[in-house]
Image (cartoon, helix red, strand yellow):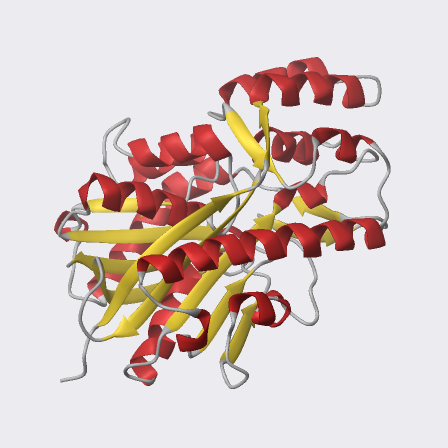
Amino acid sequence: MPSPVRLLSLATAAAPHEITQDQVAETARGLFARRFAQFDRMLPVFRNAGVRTRQLVMPVEWYLEPRSWPERGEAYLAGALDLFCRAAQGALDEADLTGAEVDIVVTVSSTGIATPSLEARAMAQMGFRPDAARVPVFGVGCAGGATGLALASRLAAAQPGARVLLVCVELCSMAFSLDKAAKADIVSTAIFGDGGAACVLRAGEGGFAEVAGYAEHTWPDTLDIMGWRIDPDSLGVILDRALPPFVRKQMRPVMEAMLAAQDLTLDDVDRFICHPGGMKVIEALEGAFDLGQGALDHERGVLADHGNMSSPTVLFILDRVRRAELPKRSVLTAMGPGFTASTVTLLAA
C-alpha cells in the first residue's frame, strides 16, 4: 500500500497595508461617482459585501494615480515575492524544514505575470536547491487554492518521500484602474484584496491532515462567468453572469457526483471548507449543501478580515478550521475561471 499524502504544515501571509471597507467605499465614491451614473445605487455592495478590512501590497495612495503595465508589473513582482517568501518560510518553519530540503515547488498565481516565475525569483532567499522541480500554475484564479493543493498532492504521491511546497500568491489589487467604472469593476473593488498562503505535503507520516481524494468539474460554455480581460494598462475583471444563482442551482449535483466517485455522499462530510467568492456566494453554498445559514463561519471571518484574495483564501480558511479543530472528514472546495469547481477531501490526522 502506498503511503498517504499528508499536509505537514500551513502558513498565511497578509499584505502590509490595511484599509477598512469604509475607506474603500469613500475612495471609490471620489473616483467613480462622476463617471458612473449609478454609483450611489451600487453603494450597498460595499455595505453588504461582508468585508470589514483587507490588505494591499501598496499604500492606497499608489492606486489613485494612473499606472502603466510596467509599473503594475514591478509592483506585482515586488509584492508577490514578499508574500511568497513570508508564506513559504512560515510553512517550512512549521514543518521543521529548510528551503534546501524542498524537492518540488508548486506556485499558483493568476494576478500578475512573472517570467521567470516567483519560485525562481525566490530561490536565493529561500535557499531552494538548484535541482528542485518548479511547477508554476497560472489562470485558475479563485479555484487555485484547491487546484494547487490537489496538484501538489498528486506530485507528492508520485514521488514518495518528496517534500512538496505549495505557495498561492495573489495581488488582486493590481487589477484596479482609474479608467474603469463598470459594474463588475465596482463589485471587485468592494471584495478583493491581496495575500499569500503556503503548505508542505509529503507521502508518509505526520502532519495535521491526510489528502484522501480530489476532484474537478468544468461546466461547458461558462467562460463568461469569471476571468481576466487584457486592458491597455492592466488586467480587467470579468464577472458577466450572476454567480450566486448559478452556485445554488449547479453546485449540489456536481458535488454529489465528485463525492460519489470517492464512495462518499454529502452526509459523509463533516465540514465543507469553501472559498468565499463573496457574502452572497457563501449564502448560496450554504443553501446548495443544506448547511444552514451561518454554518460557514470561518469563511465569513476570513472574508471580513481579508476580503477575497483569490487562490490563497481557501487556505486561510483551512488554517482557521484546523486551529479550531479539523473534523474527521472535510472537503475543501473553490471555484474559479473555466468555470471550474475543484475539491480536495481531507481526513484529520
**Above or below — where is 333 with respect to 44?**
below
Q: Position of residue 67 (x, y in %)?
A: 84, 43
Within the image, what quadrant is residue 61 found in? top right
Between 98 and 111, the one lying in front of the other is 98
In-image side of 87 versus 343 (left or right): right
Q: How many marks?
A: 0
The answer to whether residue 272 shows anywhere in this view is: yes
Between 183 and 96, the one lying in front of the other is 96
Within the image, what quadrant is residue 222 found in? bottom right
Between 140 and 51, the one lying in front of the other is 51
In-image side of 215 versus 176 (left or right): left
Within the image, what quadrant is residue 2 found in? bottom left
**Above or below — where is 39 with respect to 198?**
above
Between 69 and 56, the one lying in front of the other is 56
Q: Residue at x 71, y 44 (%)?
A: 175
Q: Quadrant of the N terminus?
A: bottom left
Residue furthest to the top in view is 40
In-image side of 260 versus 115 (left or right): left
Q: Residue at x 17, y 71 (%)?
A: 205
Q: Quadrant of the C terminus?
A: bottom left
The answer to whether residue 42 shows anywhere in this view is: no
Q: Position of residue 146 (x, y in %)?
A: 40, 58
**Above or below — where is 185 with respect to 86?**
above
Q: Position of residue 213 (x, y in %)?
A: 25, 67
Q: Position of residue 97 (x, y in %)?
A: 35, 68
Q: Residue at x 35, y 75 (%)?
A: 163
